Amino acid sequence: MSRPRQLEALHPIPAFPLNRPRRLRLHPHVRDLVSETSLDPSHFILPIFVENGLKSPKPLPSLPGHMKYPTESAELIKLIARAMELGVKGFLLFGTPSTKDFKGTQSWSPTGPIQRAIRFVRSELGWEPVIFSDVCLCGYTDHGHCGYPKSSPRGVMIDNDETIKAYAESSVSLAEAGADFVAPSGMMDGQVKAIREALDSRGFTEVGILSYSAKYASAFYGPFRDVMDSAPRFGDRRSYQMDPRNRMEAVKEVLMDLAEGADMVMVKPALSYLDVISEVKRSLPWMPIAAYNVSGEYLMVKAAAEKGYVDHDLIMLEVLTSIRRAGADIIITYHAIEAAEKLREGKLPF
Ligand code: PBG
């Protein structure tokens, strides 16, 4: 069969076929010259966990190499300063309250864990670090849901419109504490609009929104839920997080968040959703896209390396490169510091 004419126009078969592509792979510098993707710590965001009332940093067995930090601790400042020295400039804060309740009241309290940590970081390091704050209720509520459960004729439902009021309140209190961006992760409808309006009406027009636009109902969040003690006490998150079978729906979610005022959007998780990252980037090439290389993905790399059959640093860098290659501008990753260290040593495996 002859090649379709359209294909011939786009990809004409050259008269002198480039039949030795290996020429471009022979020399490492030539490989660098023709490489299509770059990996640089300036694109990383490091997630950090803080807890109200904690006395000293607590190691996290489900996230090897990570700790939970007291809100006003020298160790927290040291971590951020070390990351910045390595070129990592963005930080995403998650907080654990001293007590959980139905409404998750510490999430909008001026003395909530993230609010206290941000104030402390600002007093020690000024406005140099770019601070993103997660906005959600699951770590703050005694039921572990990202919104308020309410009984209805259909059974227990998450009350969308009451929940986004709480997100708006939290966002304002995080802006007051000094957040650069708030990052709503609850997948409630209209959350970005509610937050944007609240921030603007309180004078925080310069505080941005990184929306978890396409966040899937994924089993890859296991280690994170262990750290945050945030697994839902009943039911699951499938009535608000996205169905793993859907790709095009992510474009709809992103467009809606954009219309509501998001400055950046996110696809989460990253590794099993590279096609979604790519679809979103191709649909909206001018929109900054973050991908969240989540806790379960991180733990898989650690666990596989521990078995001894893969090289930890090589797969870490390959994973991060693949996320960039798919189209992510920003990678939120627990590997941020160790990857930045390897990149500084010039240890790219490619
Ligand atoms: C809270 C939230 C979750 C993660 C980030 N924000 C977990 C969840 O939805 O249960 C997961 C991050 C990770 O696994 O690294 N809504």
Image (cartoon, rainbow, N blue to C red):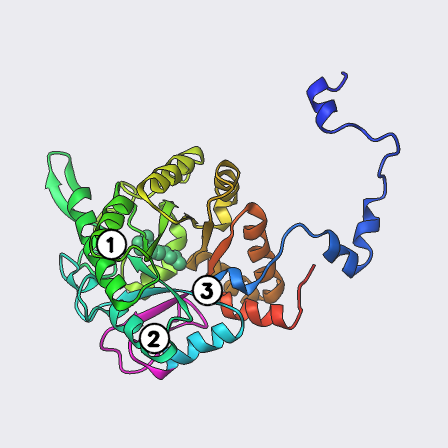
Q: Residue at x 85, y 43 (%)?
A: 20
- Residue 261: assigned label: none
- For the C terminus, the image quarter is bottom right
Indicate the amino acid at tag 3: Tyr
Q: Nearer the observer, disc 1 or disc 2?
A: 1
**Pointer 2 residue:** 121
Q: CA distance from mark 1 to mark 3?
A: 29 Å
* Residue 120 at x, y percent in the picture: 30, 77
Q: Nearer the observer, disc 1 or disc 3?
A: 1
Residue range of the region highlighted in magenta in the rendering:
45-74
* Residue 76 at x, y percent in the picture: 37, 77
Q: Residue at x 82, y 55 (%)?
A: 26
User: Is residue 93 found left or right of 140 in the rendered image?
Assistant: right
Q: Is residue 70 magenta?
A: yes
Residue toward you, 304 or 32: 32
* Residue 184 at x, y percent in the picture: 30, 52
- Residue 199: assigned label: 1
Residue toward you, 278 or 158: 278
Indicate the amino acid at tag 1: Leu
Compared with 309, 194 (above or below) is above
Q: CA distance from mark 3 to mark 2?
A: 20 Å
Q: Is residue 348 magenta?
A: no
- Mark 1 secondary-structure assignment: helix
Check disc 3: other Cα within 10 Å, few if <14, some if 14-19, many if 20+.
Answer: many
**Pointer 3 residue:** 334
The answer to whether mark 3 is within 8 Å of ligand 1 is yes
- For the N terminus, the image quarter is top right
The answer to whether mark 2 is within 8 Å of ligand 1 is no
